[in-house]
Image (tube, rainbow, N blue to C red):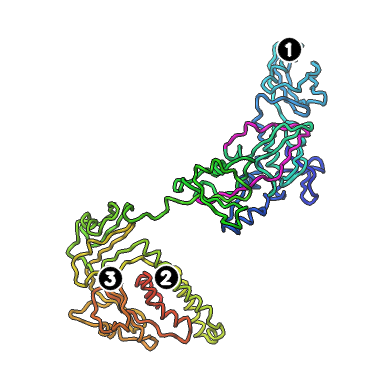
């Protein structure tokens, strides 16, 4: 009989071994690891996190091979027993080799020598024991011995096991091997208490957490024939979430504290607030439910079933500007472009001084300051604008939009516009209070961590884009030319243009609408004139026109918005 077989399994799951009532534990058709239990399901609905029971990774189907111990690792203190097969080879005055199985009387029968009792002999003593038996009849020989095959041991895995039943494993198998072969505890089974009964008496109570978390297998006993393993019901389950090294559902033994459970979770991470925790207690759910505990109090607070322990983050909190170490990147028309690490609350003037000041070609009015905190705010406005467009597109009657080829083309174009907008990213630009003819930056401006400053060279063009006959960048003309002059350079608005919504994007990032007399504004170097498309009888295109300026205000680059009109 080969190692690793089981009985007591439904016929449709059986892979027959040497005996028709046994099933190979390596059969992939065994039940997979247990499905989430009631507590796991409830926890996901409460926290929004899909947490696993700690230890379930050990029970993956791919790990079932660990249920069959390696034959090459027979320990030296292994005691031989009935059914083991011993291989003996002799040279010298007596020659030959053969395999001998230990019979029910605990003996093997060596030809011309007689019976040799082997049950109970340690593997390390086997060669000496055999040599002594042969030496009673012969002299001048060499003997080598090995255990060729181990006996089968029948054990029973009962209780809340994923695959309870009778298992036949080899005599090197331990309690853990049998539990893994049975698929581990079910959703209602305990990881903290695996009981081993022998001849009606409890001989071991093994905690799987000792193996998983500590790597301690020292108390994992070898199995004997007719041993019974019992997996009790799961104990008190406690969820640990937040800034800990392993978020999971842990099983607490009676009397264990919240500090013990946190220790099972690997403790707080390096970015955690290690001074406190938030406890959500099930019996308090109809009142305050959550309460804050000092970390020192966790060692005296006994864990209860259904507890949720949360460790809050600390390192990810945004500090006041006065306490932020600041890394600033400055590039473009400065003498020494680079990344500069400055003290908290540093000013633009200090960074500019480190960079050697501006070059003679710097176009101060067009300076682009991009800030992470601004980008986050712009992202919210931008997402809302795109959401409005999506709603407008979904609200458009499909029959009306697709009644002819031209309408279908417009509908597909609208879908492409939304897709491109979704892929775009706000740049976090801050509009600086700089005069158009200024030659210096606002030195007193306080900088934030990860600010990026780009000082462009003096531009020589003005851009005219959107619904015009000849969208392009035009060389800047000498003199005080107006927006309407450059519109004429571009051939003027096309028939589909919305002339009432024309706007001007200044080089400093500000936007001026037509209602604020944009057409009569003097054009400055680096400005962009944008002419939106007139609403095409569709709610979507009306909305796109309405949010065009919002997209610029949300930090979307001019190039990104212009690309939407192509």
When the figure is inspected, residue 165 is found, relative to residue 549, above or below; the finding is above
Closer to viewer: mark 1 or mark 2: 2
When the figure is inspected, residue 224 is found, relative to residue 369, above or below; the finding is above
Q: Are marks 3 and 1 in contact (CB under 8 Å)?
A: no
114 relative position to 237: left or right: right
The residue stretch that appears in magenta? 214-242
User: Disc 1 marks which residue?
Assistant: 135
Q: Are marks 3 and 2 in contact (CB under 8 Å)?
A: no
138 relative position to 55: left or right: right
When the figure is inspected, residue 554 is found, relative to residue 497, above or below; the finding is above
Image quarter of residue 181: top right
Q: Which mark is residue 508?
A: 3
Label 1 SS: helix
The crowd level at tag 1 (other Cα within 10 Å; few <14, some 14-19, many 20+) is: few
- Of callouts 3 and 2, the N-terminal one: 2
Q: How many marks?
A: 3
Label 3 SS: loop
Q: Which residue is at the front of the view, 474 or 395?
A: 395
Which quadrant is home to the N terminus? top right
- Of callouts 3 and 1, the N-terminal one: 1
For the view shown, which residue lies furthest in the bottom direction?
Answer: 495
When the figure is inspected, residue 561 is found, relative to residue 113, above or below; the finding is below
**What percent of the width, then of the height, locates residue 467?**
36, 83
Determine the CA span between mark 3 and mark 2.
20 Å
User: Disc 2 marks which residue?
Assistant: 381
Q: Is residue 475 magenta?
A: no
Q: Which mark is residue 491?
A: none
**What percent of the width, then of the height, locates residue 338?**
27, 55
- Of callouts 1 and 2, the N-terminal one: 1
Determine the CA span between mark 1 and mark 2.
94 Å
* Residue 264 visible in this rendered orientation of the protein: no
Closer to viewer: mark 3 or mark 1: 3
């Amino acid at each position: 009989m080969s190692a690793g077989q089981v009985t007591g399994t439904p016929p449709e799951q059986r892979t027959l071994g040497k005996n028709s009532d046994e099933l190979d534990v390596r059969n992939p058709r065994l039940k997979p690891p247990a499905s989430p239990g009631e507590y796991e399901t409830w926890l996901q609905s409460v926290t929004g996190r899909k947490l696993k029971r700690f230890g379930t990774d050990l029970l993956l189907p791919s790990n079932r091979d660990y249920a069959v111990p390696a034959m090459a690792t027979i320990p030296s203190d292994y005691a031989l027993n009935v059914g083991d097969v011993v291989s003996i080879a002799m040279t010298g005055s007596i020659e030959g080799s053969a395999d001998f199985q230990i019979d029910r009387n605990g003996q093997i029968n060596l030809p011309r020598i007689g019976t040799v009792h082997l049950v109970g002999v340690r593997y390390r003593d086997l060669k000496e024991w055999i040599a002594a038996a042969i030496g009673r009849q012969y002299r001048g020989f060499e003997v080598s011995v090995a255990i060729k095959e181990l006996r089968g041991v029948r054990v029973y895995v009962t209780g809340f096991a994923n695959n309870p039943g009778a298992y036949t494993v080899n005599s090197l198998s331990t309690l853990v091997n049998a539990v893994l072969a049975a698929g581990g505890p079910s959703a209602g089974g305990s990881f903290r208490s695996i009981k081993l009964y022998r001849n009606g008496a409890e001989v071991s109570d093994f905690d799987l957490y000792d193996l998983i978390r500590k790597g301690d297998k020292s108390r994992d006993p070898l199995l004997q024939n007719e041993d019974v393993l019992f997996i009790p019901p799961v104990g008190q389950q406690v969820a640990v979430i937040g800034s800990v090294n392993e978020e999971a559902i842990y099983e607490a033994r009676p009397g264990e504290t919240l500090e013990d459970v946190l220790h099972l979770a690997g403790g707080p991470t390096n970015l955690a607030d290690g001074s406190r925790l938030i406890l959500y207690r099930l019996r308090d759910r109809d009142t305050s439910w959550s309460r804050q505990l000092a970390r020192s109090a966790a060692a005296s607070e006994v864990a209860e079933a259904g507890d949720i322990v949360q460790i809050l983050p600390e390192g990810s909190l945004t500090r006041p500007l006065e306490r932020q170490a600041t890394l600033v990147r400055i590039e473009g028309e400065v003498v020494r472009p680079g990344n500069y690490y400055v003290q908290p609350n540093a000013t633009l003037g200090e960074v500019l001084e480190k960079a050697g000041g501006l070059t003679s070609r710097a176009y101060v009015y067009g300076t682009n300051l991009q800030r992470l905190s601004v980008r986050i705010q712009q992202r919210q406005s931008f997402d809302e604008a795109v959401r409005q467009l999506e709603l407008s597109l979904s609200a458009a009657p499909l029959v009306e939009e697709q009644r002819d080829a031209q309408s279908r083309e417009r509908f597909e174009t609208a879908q492409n516009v939304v897709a491109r907008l979704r892929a775009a990213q706000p740049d976090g630009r801050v509009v600086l209070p700089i005069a158009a003819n200024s030659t210096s930056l606002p030195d007193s401006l306080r900088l934030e961590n990860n600010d990026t400053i780009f000082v462009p060279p003096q531009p020589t063009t003005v851009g005219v884009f959107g619904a015009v006959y000849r969208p392009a960048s035009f060389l800047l003309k000498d003199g005080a030319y107006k927006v309407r002059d450059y519109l004429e350079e571009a051939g003027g608005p096309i028939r589909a243009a919305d002339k009432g919504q024309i706007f001007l994007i200044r080089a400093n990032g500000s936007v001026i609408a037509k209602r604020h007399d944009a057409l009569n504004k003097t054009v400055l170097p680096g400005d962009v004139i944008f002419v939106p498309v007139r609403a095409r009888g569709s709610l979507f295109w009306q909305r796109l026109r309405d949010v065009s300026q919002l997209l610029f205000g949300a930090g979307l680059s001019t190039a990104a918005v212009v690309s939407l009109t192509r």
